[in-house]
Image: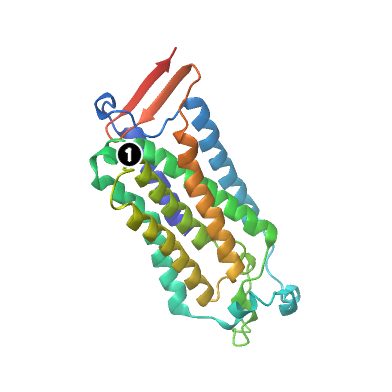
């Protein structure tokens, strides 16, 4: 999952940096970017991601002595009875599809012309989500449900990933990307008749991912609920923050699919 997210971030950032052209003919875009503000957003996302990687790499391995089924609340305990390998693999596909939804923005001219800005916002969204997800996982250290399966291989070597249940990274990644797509589509095409369908898919697909994670024995219901809320908040919030017009004086920039437009407010 992390490898796919890193590749998608890198691809979109490259599109932003190496595109050339002029934004002036495209009209006023729905988002505003600036060197100063986005340095904080992008830098904060990168720093958060690096911190998450560090904490995750230094998470101690799970010990059998740490296991106590009695600590699993009654609402979550149902997950300890699931271990579907098919559901586990299918959750990878639904998450990947959620992350790829934003590619659909290339289909329409207005968002395609402004795709550099969309790429920047998407990179910020995924970096913040990845970092916060890993930080929460590394501090909560919750054993995954399948560890309590009576049929688990007794020779299995437990690792730090076996105690990375809360929150669900598949769910948070899918929801942040899907909500980002839905919010961005709505901002570029507020009168589109496709908006209800876009939001419907963007809400349902991550929810399906979370369900499959529970059925696969990888997460508890509260893991996917928390992951859904975390990812949804980030995916919706990043575009919202960029909707606010820049009233301060100074240099601003708008990366597009055809170039990087610079402007100065006096």
Res. 53 in view? no
* Residue plotted at (27% across, 29% down): 20
Name the image colouring.
rainbow
Q: Which quadrant holds the C terminus?
A: top left
In percent of width and height, residue 179 lies at 44, 52
Given the current orientation, which residue lies at the most extreme bottom position? Answer: 151
In percent of width and height, residue 253 lies at 40, 25
| Left or right, 99 with reference to 75 | left
- 61 is higher (above) or lower (below) than 43: below
Q: Which residue is mark 1?
A: 115
- Of residues 189 and 25, the one nearer the viewer is 189
Q: Residues within 10 Å of mark 1 (few under 14, many from 20)?
A: many
In percent of width and height, residue 190 lies at 34, 43
Res. 42 in view? yes
- 31 is higher (above) or lower (below) than 91: above
* Rendering quarter of residue 94: bottom left
- 76 is higher (above) or lower (below) than 194: below
Q: How many marks?
A: 1
- 192 is higher (above) or lower (below) than 66: above
* Residue plotted at (57% across, 49% down): 131
| Left or right, 55 with reference to 191 | right
- Of residues 111 and 192, the one nearer the viewer is 192
SS for dot 1: helix
In percent of width and height, residue 39 lies at 52, 31
- Of residues 156 and 68, the one nearer the viewer is 68
């Amino acid at each position: 999952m992390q490898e796919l997210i890193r590749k998608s971030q890198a691809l979109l950032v490259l599109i932003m940096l190496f595109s050339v052209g002029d934004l002036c003919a495209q009209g006023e875009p729905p988002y505003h970017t600036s060197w100063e503000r986005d340095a904080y957003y992008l830098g904060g996302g990168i720093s958060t991601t690096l911190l998450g990687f560090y904490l995750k790499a230094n998470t101690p391995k799970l010990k059998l002595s740490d296991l106590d089924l009695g600590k699993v609340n009654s609402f979550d305990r149902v997950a300890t009875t699931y271990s579907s390998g098919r559901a586990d693999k299918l959750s990878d596909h639904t998450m990947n599809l959620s992350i790829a939804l934003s590619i659909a923005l290339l289909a329409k001219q207005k968002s395609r012309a402004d795709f550099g800005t969309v790429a920047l916002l998407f990179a910020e969204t995924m970096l913040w989500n990845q970092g916060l997800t890993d930080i929460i996982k590394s501090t909560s250290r919750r054993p995954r449900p399948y560890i309590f399966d009576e049929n688990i291989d007794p020779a299995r070597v437990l690792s730090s990933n076996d105690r990375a249940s809360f929150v669900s990274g598949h769910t948070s990644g899918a929801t942040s990307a899907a909500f980002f797509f839905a919010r961005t589509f709505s901002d570029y095409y507020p009168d589109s008749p496709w908006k209800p369908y876009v939001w419907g898919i963007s809400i349902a697909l991550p929810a399906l991912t979370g369900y499959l994670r529970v059925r696969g024995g990888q997460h508890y219901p509260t893991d996917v609920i928390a992951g859904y809320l975390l990812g949804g908040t980030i995916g919706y919030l990043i575009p919202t923050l960029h909707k606010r017009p820049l009233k301060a004086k100074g240099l601003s920039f708008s990366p597009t699919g055809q170039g990087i437009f610079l402007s100065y407010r006096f």
